[in-house]
Amino acid sequence: MDKKKLDSFYIYLNSEQTAQKYLYRSYQNLTGVDAEKKSYENCNAFMYYLAHGRKFYKTGQKLEPLLQPILFFYGMVHLLKAVLLTKRPDYPESTTMLAHGVSTRKRKKKQYKFVNDEVKVQYKGLFPYVMEHLFNKKTMPFSKITMHRLLSLIPEISPLFHFHGETHLVKIGTIGATHLTFPNHLLDDYHLTKKAFINRLSPYLPDILESLSSKGLIHLHLADPFMIQEGPFFIHTNQSIYFPTDRESFISISEIMIHYLLLYNLSMVSRYETEWWGDLLVTKPEIDFPLILQFLKVTAHKIPFLLGKELYKEIH
């Protein structure tokens, strides 16, 4: 789906009539829901979530990085709530779901580095709620995780790590392909035999018809085209598929939620660590700056696109 078509879809949903019709079609797929009643009840909230979320992003894209984390984070929250409303007609069922669902250290240590900071997942709140109801993950893949690891899983940021002498992702194919290629050195990185490595991958892939090895590569031929949109595989905006080189980064999580965690922490830092945030933007002392800058450029467009695709899936 291209960006122009998705922009048209967002515009289409921008009225009570079209929002109600869209929600009605979504709710017809849910058990025990009065689709007509709930679609009329929720159409205004749904429409405003979308409108406000997109406005936050469009405003943020025009501003300096100083304010972008806050605008992008709340823009993302609004778009996530719109997507949730298509699957959970009674959202929010309680006030506990209105919390962010993650936390970070309130007072930063001396010699603070963003890449070394971490976020912790809470039992209640938006993050675990979205993980369960949008991505069918009742068990969290981690209890806490560093910013470095999160950033390393975003394909568009991979070149910056490479320039810095770090390789965290390898390209293995393209969306829609039935053939994936993995470098043999991953077996050493994962401490697995070829058979064990393929067994570890198989739950996340279409049926594997055969596996072959040649010239330091493992070739997997799939029964169906690869269309998976979540970890342990990560998709570049150019439709290339990337896979983590580090076994600790073999995480079953949507990239959408990786951006959520990064934006949450960045928005907290920009609001409450004013001196550090100001110094970062002015003096650009360490790799934190280019990584954050590149992330903000990527997330500004990638998240509205990915969440728009989630909405579009509901009617196709």
Image: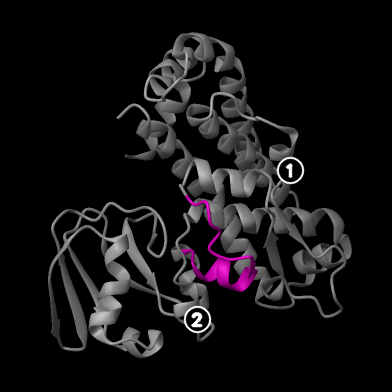
Please provide percent x and percent y for residue 40: 53, 10
Q: Is residue 241 left or right of residue 101?
A: left
Please provide percent x and percent y for residue 96: 73, 39
Q: Is residue 141 magenta?
A: yes
Q: Is residue 38 magenta?
A: no
The colour scheme of the drawn protein is one colour
Q: Which residue is mark 2?
A: 163
Nearer the observer: mark 2 or 1; the answer is: 1
Mark 2 and mark 1: span between their CA atoms? 38 Å
Q: Which residue is mark 1?
A: 99
Is residue 257 at least partly visible in the picture?
yes
**Which residue is nearer to you in this view: 155 or 191?**
191
**Which residue is nearer to you in this view: 291 or 210?**
210
Q: Is residue 100 left or right of residue 79?
A: right
For disc 2, the neighbor class at 10 Å (few under 14, some 14 to 19, many from 20) is few
The quarter of the rendered structure image containing the C terminus is top left
Please provide percent x and percent y for residue 202: 27, 66
Q: Secondary structure at mark 1?
A: loop
Q: Residue at x 59, y 34 (%)?
A: 81
Q: Residue at x 59, y 43 (%)?
A: 129
Residue 135 drawn above or below residue 167: above
Looking at numbered disc 2 in the image, what kind of residue is underneath it? Phe
Residue 314 is marked as: none
Looking at the rendering, which quadrant does residue 61 occupy?
Answer: top right
Q: Is residue 216 left or right of residue 163?
A: left
Q: Residue at x 56, y 48 (%)?
A: 300
Residue 71 drawn above or below residue 222: above
